[in-house]
Amino acid sequence: MASFKVSENFSATFNLSSSSSKFRDQTTNLSLHLRGNSTYPVLISKLQSNDEAKGRSWRTFMHRHRINGASQNYITDKYSESIFPVISADCDYDSETKMSANVSATILDKLKAVRLWLLASENQNFSKLKLCHRIYQLSATNLTHYLALQVLNAEQLNESLSSIGLLHLKSASPCILESIKNGIQMLENLVDYRDINDYVPSIECDNMISAMRERVSLNAAELFGPSDRKKGVSIMATVGREAMANDALITDLLRAGANVLRINCAHDGPNVWKEIIRMAKSSSQMLAKPCRVLMDLAGAKPRTGPPMSETDELMVSSVQILMCSNGRIPDDLSPDGIICVDEELIDGLKMGDVVHFSDGRGKKNSFKVVKKFLHVDGSVFTVESTRTTTIRVGTKLYQQKGSKKISVGQVFKLLKADKFMVLKVGDLLTVSRLCCSPTNSTTAKLIICSSDHLYDAVKPDEPIAFDDGRIQGKIQEKNADEIIVLITHASPAGSKLGTDKSINIPKSEVQLKGLTKKDLADLDFITTHADMVGLSFVRNVNDIESIQDELEKRKQSQLGIILKVETREAFEKLPDLLFHAMQYPNPLGVMIGRGDLMVECGWENMAEIQEEIITVCAAAHVPVIWATGVLESFVKSGLPSRAEITDVASGMRASCIMLNKGDHIADAVLALDSTLHKEEKITLANPLLPPLNGEI
């Protein structure tokens, strides 16, 4: 028994939770009537009122724990089974409090030193902070504090803070300096022998912490619009051409819970995009539900063109058919077929010329040149026919000049675009940017890619991945215009590879060009139709400068900007990217492009990477979009996997969760909306659960 001196008046009856190891797994229900300044022989323990909910407002207690002769002091506001103090019989409350106060003073000194360190970092980065727009000044300053804190080895301090029931510094990322100030005030209260539960933070400090924690939610609402969920987590659904064939799709998505639609400019074109946005506005107005539109620029990322296969005959109609003698396929062009002509005579053709030939049945036919590409190597044209006709290998082409026939050349090869090809481990794949790729005897599998920097960057034996890493290979050979790839990873039955799939070269030194010609053309449409623009494959501050210059030309200071973190370089430079983006008033967000990031950085690092991105953005009060692969099985097949449900739970810490296209996307959005509402109810009912949406 130890002496416990009580210096307060009590009239209630208390239950005694024993700190003795003998009673470690149970509560000893002893009635203890405390009156006046009497001294009672009791075990050192927490006192809980009979009508008091357990774990809510227990009194702070001081523990001393002896291990191998060494004494460790604890201050805690909750009972912990890991702490079983051994108190000597001659120890009274006052002496124990003084020992604990000494511990508090030590932690207090450390916290004060950390506070000075953060203020010094703020002063050191004054010039950088001064460049930030006024609406981001507070956020940029907090980000500076966060980065300064990462330099310190604060693990021991965090353990000490946790041991006395104070906030872990990492959990305070939205309001670091104010949280540390608050902790200092609380510890000063303890050092002065006052009860921590009697501590009331200053109104100024409390208001500042609340305002900074709320800032992420306010920024998210500015970017994504209002959400009917209490924690403000938005649902983003990706839509494309399929919305044109299903008039109810967008209405179903909004009714199911989506409040943001995403259009990927790597697919379709302005006519399709315009119709999607028109349908979105109509559905939004009909349902009285807000809907924002994000349009992602395609960027300079290499993507697959159509898989091509040789054929004896080719249908020519209004589809996009190339005719060439040699040369490279123009950037961002995905032809439906290629007519390879063996003579350079076609170089004299111009737009509007008509080329005649005899079709497969011997009937005279023709097609018209609708475009000539001037800035590519070789002779490359787009041709079309007003009626469907067939052309065969060996067909002679000519122009009619009066009564004369002037030869244009003879077809020596025809290539037709396939929807997809199937690749297996051990297959050889040719990736080419040539219009008329020469037949390779070692491989019959050919795919088009017009990206210049792909061929400039890769070297033999370097890895290459397709479709977010679902298909992987190794570079066997390369030249200026073609790459031969040995497939090293695919599904056992073979993996499908189609058009517009990502190509990643994680070990190659890639020199991306920034905004492409297509991006600039698409930006004209985006600035007049969308609420946000997604900056794909951002790598450094030059990319942000480029997009801001273009937006300034178009007088678009209110267009939201989403930095898509899809490369290792972007991840490593994320703080610099945020500081630079905060120099402008545009609403700002970050998308975690987990598909490309996994290929670039390795799947084994993804958990740490996405956690770090969320924490850094929380410190900068920047909303995060949790993207790529969310409920992917559900979207495609109608049934989710257990892992996908867990992934959704992790994604709830972000401000927005994005779903990709699929046949069951409306059902997936409805399920996600239901999950978000249920999780919010659980979190609100249980204050011990971690908060959502970065609100620590």
Image: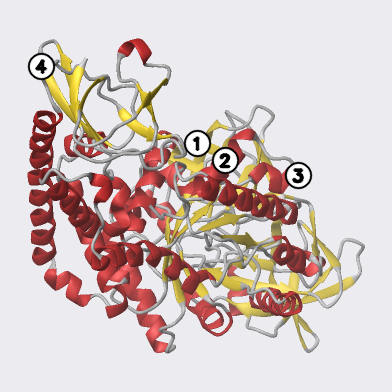
Q: Which mark is residue 70?
A: 4
In this figure, which residue is indicated by the disc labeled 2? 429
Residue 406 in picture, x, y percent from top left = 71, 78
| Vertical side of 541 occupied by 13: above or below | above
Q: Who is closer to the viewer here, 313 or 196?
A: 196
First of labels 2, 1 by sequence position: 2
Task: Identify residue type, mark 4.
Answer: Ala
In this figure, which residue is indicated by the disc labeled 3? 638
Residue under the image location 83 percent in, 78 percent down: 386
In this figure, which residue is indicated by the disc labeled 1? 473
Q: Quadrant of residue 165?
A: top left
Q: Tell me if label 2 and label 4 are in contact, CB under 8 Å.
A: no
Task: Identify residue type, mark 3.
Answer: Gly
Residue under the image location 17 percent in, 40 percent down: 154
Residue 254 in picture, x, y percent from top left = 70, 66
> Rounded to the nearest whole Å, what is the CA distance between mark 1 and mark 4?
58 Å
Q: Tell me if label 1 and label 4 are in contact, CB under 8 Å.
A: no
> Rounded to the nearest whole Å, what is the CA distance between mark 2 and mark 1?
9 Å
Task: Identify residue type, mark 2.
Answer: Leu
